[in-house]
Amino acid sequence: MRDWIEEARAAGLAQPASVAFVTVGADGAPSARTVNLKRIEPGTLVFTSATWTRKARELTANPRVSLLFHWPSLGRQVHLAGEATWAERALAEELFDERDLHHQLQTVVSRQGEPVEELEPLRDRLEHLVAVQETPPRCPDDWGALRVRPLAVEFWAESPDRIHERRLFEPAAEGESWRVTLLSP
């Protein structure tokens, strides 16, 4: 997956690490949003989120997720089913510190997904902070990092004859690497 993201980046694609991140609500309804992958660690994918969002509430109730990376101009996608867990506070702080200052300030200003009367007060507050902030803000207490451990990963590569290549990777027996299955398109 790392190679495909890097190829998308090399091809100049906007947001090559963007992914549809799907959770399931208490009512059983799926909920999708686009997020950015922050890093790939051995055995996990790392993301960030405020800990009070709908996504966070849904993950607390059901940690199973589905992720979909899609690079249409490259004819590729990766679908991953996995399980999310909250990471240690130090990782959340490290990833927050890596954010662009404007994104850090936006995180402080906006309670993502919460109802608002209008956007102008948020824009005014952000503009004010950009003008007066002398040092980057510290990571908010309600900001966290998530690790997603893959349980199955499918790589899909488009073919002009529509006999697309699909390879499903699933955990093999204890102590072994992944089992790979070629799937019919």
Image: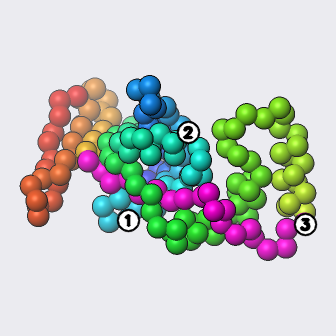
Crowd class of label 1 (few under 14; some 14 to 19; many from 20; radius 10 Å): few
The residue that mark 1 highlights is 41
The image shows residue 102 at horizontal and vertical percentages of 75, 59
Of mark 3 and mark 1, the one earlier in the sequence is 1
Of mark 1 and mark 2, the one earlier in the sequence is 1
Q: Amino acid at mark 3?
A: Val
Q: Secondary structure at mark 3?
A: helix
Of mark 3 and mark 2, the one earlier in the sequence is 2
Q: CA distance from mark 3 to mark 2?
A: 31 Å
Q: Residue at x 22, y 28 (%)?
A: 185
> Coloring scheme of the render?
rainbow
The image shows residue 61 at horizontal and vertical percentages of 42, 41
Contact check, label 1 and label 2, Cβ < 8 Å: no
Foreground label between 3 and 2: 2
Q: Specify whether residue 3 is in view.
A: no
Residue 93 picture quarter:
bottom right
User: For the magenta stretch, what is the residue range?
Assistant: 132-151
Foreground label between 1 and 2: 2
Q: Amino acid at mark 1?
A: Glu
